[in-house]
Image (cartoon, rainbow, N blue to C red):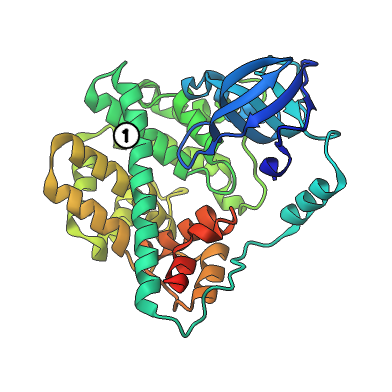
Amino acid sequence: MWLDVALPERRFVSTQGSLVRVLVPGVANRHEGPDFLNAEIVVDGRLLRGHIEIHSNADDWYTHGHDTDARYDSVVLHVALYGATTDRPMPMTVVLSGQLDGPFRERWREAMGAKPGIPCAHWTHEHDAARRDCMLLLCAIGRFERKVARFSVRYDELSTLHSGAEALLQTAWEGFARAAGYGGNEVAMERLARALPLRVVVDAPEKHRHAMLLAATGQHSGLSIDVRECGVLPSNRVPARLRWLAVLAPALASPAWQRSIRDIVMAGPGTAVSQLHSLLRACTSDGAPGPDRCTELLVNVIAPMAKLYADIHMRQELSKAATALYHSIHPAPQNNITRRVASAIGLSMPCSSGQQQGMIELYTEFCTRERCRDCLLRRGMES
């Protein structure tokens, strides 16, 4: 919707009082970092080149930690639908509320009220299932490569400050914390793990670890880590997950626990979920992830981290095992997105983890972005 109004002939007024025109809106970024790369804008007659970041609320610049993330140093324009509630400094910011016409506001209301779906007219259940399965496989491969790349970038950043082993552990710690942020707290929990590194939590007395993590999410912590409790069962709310992370920290730093994780990856997808579940319950039964959440941890954290470790240390067998683990866990948890996509493309459920990831990739990278011309389903129809 931003691209619909970011036209060269349109002038916006920034919160700093400057006149802003967007000559080149930039290229959508599918990886971590600013949302649009290599944009060109004109601010009060001055040409600026850099990146553009988009938020619903201007306060998210701080909530998401962009103020301390070097990847956002080249942002020349920050766009938000709603203004900030504080007067903290921000890059050149345009607040769209009050500067938009009726059709944009109507589209925004429709988007906010719409249920996740896959409005696709290019596929019917009579089409070649083999082509559909190949499409899901390619989507899953691309998604896995980005997961590994995301951990790799963070590992490279940490390697400039710490040893390789410590950088890997901190990268994994942030990955586990992000995975524990389901329900809308992914970014906040990852920020928490960065603010309280693994070695800090491990070095703290055992009885203080949970309180340390919990205090960091408080309003007066100074870290601006905003966690939300909406849509999450009481037994899974943030304090319970922080209690689990407090117990996970010393286990993650243990060489024996690390060997157990590698053994789980090498054992294959058939037993990985049950073995990880047992390993985590051995740490604590209070708030430990269940089987479905263990599958998510294996797919989103353990498999890509194992692949990164294998690539760094040239462990070909571990690399193959990590890739196989990502693709082949069965059954994989269902959600609203996978159920709708599976219904649209005629895929029987339950599905494997690779099919699950492929459907999520199809939905997030093509359907929600209206990239129908790039979608492999349509290209298959045209061929």
Q: Toward the viewer: 337 or 374?
A: 374
Total of numbered circles in the picture? 1
Residue found at x 39% / y 23%: 205
**Image position of 231 with respect to 20: above or below:** below
Residue 24 occupies which quadrant of the picture? Answer: top right
Q: Toward the viewer: 298 or 106?
A: 106
Residue found at x 21% / y 60%: 268
- Identify the residue position indicated by label 1 in the image: 152
x, y percentage for residue 55? Answer: 66, 35
x, y percentage for residue 366? Answer: 53, 57
Residue 35 left/right relative to 247: right
Mark 1 Cα-neighbour bin, 10 Å: few <14, some 14–19, many ≥20: many
- Residue type at mark 1: give it: Ser
Q: Is residue 224 at all visible to an observer of this figure? A: no
Residue found at x 44% / y 42%: 244
Q: Is residue 377 at all visible to an observer of this figure? A: yes
Residue 174 occupies which quadrant of the picture? Answer: top left
Residue found at x 56% / y 39%: 239
Residue 229 left/right relative to 125: right
Residue 44 left/right relative to 348: right
x, y percentage for residue 329? Answer: 32, 64
Q: Secondary structure at mark 1?
A: helix
Quadrant for the C terminus, please.
bottom left
x, y percentage for residue 279? Answer: 29, 50
